[in-house]
Amino acid sequence: MIEMLYKIAPEENGLASVAKILSAHPEVEFVSFVGVDIWGYSTDEKIPVKVFLEDFESLMKSGVQTDGSSVMLPHIAELDNAKVDILPDRDVNWYVDYNYDHIDNETGLPVGTLRIPSVLVHNETLAVGSRVILKQAIQEFKKEVLEAITENSYIWEYIGIKSPDEIAEIELTSATELEFWVKTPDDKADREQLATSQTLKEQYWKRTVGPVRTALEKTLKILDLYGFEVEMGHKEVGGVKAKLVGRGSFDHVMEQLEIDWKYSEALQAADNEAQVKNVVKDVFRNSGLDVTFQAKPIALAAGNGEHTHLGVAARMKDGRRVNLFNSNDPSQFMSPIGYGALMGLLKNYEVLNPFIASTNDALQRLKPGFEAPVCIVTSLGRDAHTPSRNRTVLAGLVRELDNPYSTRFELRSPNPKSNTYLVMAASYLAMLDGIKAVLEAGRGPEELEKEISKGYGEPAVYLEKDRVYRSEKNVFTEYTPEERNRLFGKAPATVWESAVELDNNPDKLSVLYRGDVFNDLIISSYKEAMIDMWQTELSTRILEDYRDVVRDCVKLSPEIETDYDVEIWSRIDLLKQELMKDSKTHESLFLKTRRALKLKDYPLASELQLEIGEKIETLLKLYSEYKKNIY
């Protein structure tokens, strides 16, 4: 495998260099321009390498054209205005995607496709889609942060520079952590076994065995060949022990894994994540295992997170790198730039959340009890000499006392289905808002620590008065739900509740409009996609899945039926009728929800979704108790 081609670096993507590289690797037979739409879906067309090289200059200049109505760009590329070009990005790595099921007869190697990250352009003038939004956000952030450092000289001593003339470039360093569930095909989860195993922590960081071990080891080796510099792969908290069904053969595999790799520049980090997912899916499926990146694929078990690490550094002209979040003073948690960035992230989170938790699945994960964040709150550490390891907060400050380069923020709410391009774009713009506010006011770390640590009702210069933003406690156990809602703000429980935050917070939304990175057209396009995906999934998938749950709760025929059996079955039957059964005098909750969606009464549909979810959970618990008393 070391003989295969894995990437072409930006400095190698001229015609002569590309032709030489591809001629040395005949296993790479196709080229694909990968554009990413507003929802995060990517294109994948197959251009034979011979055609690509013959038309190289033209393709580099004009790209390829796609039917814009077939990608997710509402209000932008419609049926009557659908011209979208896919233009290659020559500033990032181009990765080769291998088909391990298709072996080339001549080389004996898997057939590869060179995937070129690209920009979508509508009507030859308007750059659109997720990659370009992140690219523009990065440019805006770098420009404005450098200007703010230049214009506010008091900050120089805190970050350890004598003059901004020493700075060659501002760098945005980012990374994601990928969690995913693995299982043997057709196996269904036993919710109670999974919940028990998770409580007992039987799987977390345990030794992998059988096909899971083999697939994980193969994956890590291949990712290193791509140059991702894998740091580790390990079991996560979810899962149950697989069954040995034959000599060396395992069945009923149900495990959660995590893979971590090194940080990169923000846009490259987002591209890297997409390729890592491709490798994970291909290798595990080649080993006979299903992989899911869903945020909450199994009820009552841990969901898949994708913690996103956000950092900012200055690359100096003398070759040094300066972490702009780190403080030169060991008695301080961060520099004023770090405080400003974190405060901007927290203050504006209501309009970031729609880009992070944008699906029904994502919001199912963000609930108390599964180590997923539920509150807009941070942890800094009990003091500057004791870095925080509070895993219950939304955004944590990550520090290593002996490594100033490590200081960064870990945003814990994204999941593997989040659109990482938009997560990073929105996050860095929110951070920019806080940085500029702090630097323009000339504020130091002591007063900034005091503000971010403020109590409820205390006035603040930048943050909101009636909110709390820092807690070193376990926010799941130390506060009641009512206290959490009052202190940290009530989290949206449905996609509709998340989407309307874009309308309810115009001042915060304007933060994303800086430099025209986001604008009315982009927000309306994204919001329509979000709502359309929500209502379609609710109507055609979620309600149908719930219908199967209701049907599976059937009356049993015990040898002896007690009054307890009769009473609990009566409650189950009433719930089933309330949820699903229609009559001339009674409309089920399912029917009411479908009608509300058809009439576009989305607030009502959102309320009904929550009511149905609660009743389904009650139904499952009741039926579990009912079965336990039957023999």
Image (spheres, rainbow, N blue to C red):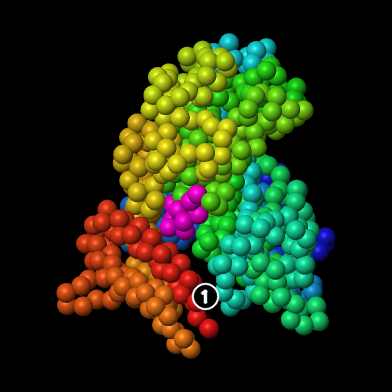
Q: In this view, does 156 lie above or below 494?
A: above
Depth check, front residue: 474 or 467: 474
Q: Does the magenta stretch include residue 177?
A: no
Q: Residue at x 25, y 66 (%)?
A: 592
- Residue furthest out toward the left: 585
**Residue assigned mark 1:** 628
Q: Where is residue 353 in the image (x, y as percent from the top left)?
A: 44, 44
Residue 264's quadrant in the figure? top right
Q: Residue at x 50, y 77 (%)?
A: 629
Q: Position of residue 213 (x, y in %)?
A: 76, 65
Magenta stretch? 358-368
Q: Tell me, yes or no, if residue 283 can be seen here.
A: yes
Q: Is residue 18 above or below residue 91?
A: below
**Looking at the picture, which amino acid does disc 1 mark?**
Lys
Classify mark 1: residues with Cα within 10 Å, few (<14), some (14-19) or many (20+). Answer: few
Is 537 placed left or right of 193 in the picture? left
